[in-house]
């Protein structure tokens, strides 16, 4: 900058740590706090996922899903996600029958327990599918969500594999409770199968994306309510003064 006497004077660099922008679409990626758009985006997929539940083998046949070499890992995970839901329904039906037989006068409680477990199985299956297939890794804690983070695929995938192994061990606790409880033991132990397959699929999906940023390209995007803020990372050697020619 030139002053009135013609001398050059230094110009202070303008720092912009935060910039507010309108998102290019209704999708919310990055860190979200009380993000209504993310919730609406999940609700918008209810029809799509319900269709997947009604036709669990629409994307992949029953025989093909057992192999670990798949052309589309997303379709593989989607198929096992739907199968996992129906697997949970069958287990709860058997548990309902056993409870109705063994617990006299507890039919009403058994019915409520069955309804709640089926609803919870659908919600968790839908949330898991949405976070993996639609958001490439998603983790929510209270009102804070992190999306488009491939590293979460690895973490959640390992957790599902461990959870499947825990199911196998825990199922042994029911085998000696009653004469018919071995049926529940077999069903509960078999539930480890879809969990482990889903976990393997997620680990393989992460392996395909491990060259990407672990927390995604939008890790510097923070969504608070309906406002999007971009946090610009500070430069390694910030210049306080910039001389203009």
Image (cartoon, rainbow, N blue to C red):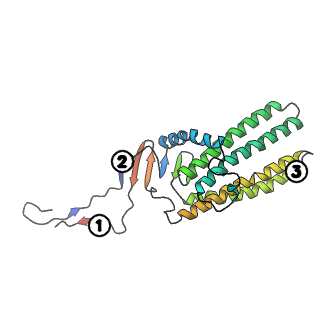
Instruction: Assign a secondary structure to mark 2.
Output: strand
Q: Quadrant of residue 152?
A: bottom right
Q: Name the residue under label 2.
A: 21
Compared across the picture, whether 147 is left or right of 188 comes to left
Compared across the picture, whether 16 is left or right of 72 comes to left
Measure how far apart labels 3 and 2 are at the Cα level: 59 Å
Picture coordinates of residue 140, whole percent (x, y):
56, 49
Compared across the picture, whether 177 is left or right of 61 comes to right
Can residue 139 be seen here? no
Give the label, 1 or 3, closer to the camera. 3
Can residue 97 be seen here? yes
Query: What residue lies at 37% left-to-right and 68% top-to-bottom?
Result: 236
Query: What residue lies at 48% left-to-right and 48% top-to-bottom?
Result: 32
Mark 1 / mark 3, whichever is N-terminal: 3
Measure how far apart labels 1 and 3 are at the Cα level: 70 Å
Mark 1 / mark 2, whichever is N-terminal: 2
Identify the image quadrant of the C terminus: bottom left
Mark 1 Cα within 10 Å, few/some/many (few <14, many 20+)? few
Compared across the picture, whether 200 is left or right of 165 comes to left
Is residue 168 shown above or below 28? below
Q: Name the residue under label 1.
A: 239
Residue extending furthest toward the left: 5
* Label number found at residue 175: 3
- Are the residues at dot 3 and dot 2 in contact (C-beta closer than 8 Å)? no
Picture coordinates of residue 135, whole percent (x, y):
53, 51
Identify the image quadrant of the N terminus: bottom left
């Amino acid at each position: 900058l030139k002053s009135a006497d013609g001398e050059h004077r230094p110009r202070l660099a303008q720092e912009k740590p935060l910039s507010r922008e309108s998102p290019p679409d209704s999708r919310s990626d990055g860190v979200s706090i009380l993000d209504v758009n993310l919730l609406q985006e999940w609700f918008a997929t209810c029809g799509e996922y319900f269709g997947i539940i009604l036709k669990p083998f629409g994307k992949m046949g029953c025989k093909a899903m057992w192999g670990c070499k798949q052309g589309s890992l997303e379709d593989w995970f989607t198929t096992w996600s739907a199968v996992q839901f129906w697997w949970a329904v069958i287990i709860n039906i058997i548990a309902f029958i056993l409870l109705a037989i063994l617990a006299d006068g507890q039919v009403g409680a058994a019915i409520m327990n069955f309804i709640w477990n089926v609803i919870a199985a659908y919600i968790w299956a839908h949330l898991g599918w949405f976070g993996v297939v639609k958001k490439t890794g998603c983790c929510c804690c209270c009102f804070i969500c992190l999306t488009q983070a491939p590293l979460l695929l690895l973490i959640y995938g390992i957790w599902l594999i461990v959870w499947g192994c825990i199911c196998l061990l825990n199922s042994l606790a029911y085998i000696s409770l009653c004469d018919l409880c071995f049926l529940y033991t077999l069903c509960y132990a078999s539930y480890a199968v879809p969990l482990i397959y889903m976990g393997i699929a997620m680990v393989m999906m992460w392996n395909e994306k491990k060259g990407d940023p672990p927390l995604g390209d939008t890790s510097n995007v923070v969504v608070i309510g309906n406002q999007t803020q971009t946090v610009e990372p500070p430069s390694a050697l910030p210049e306080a003064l910039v001389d203009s020619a």
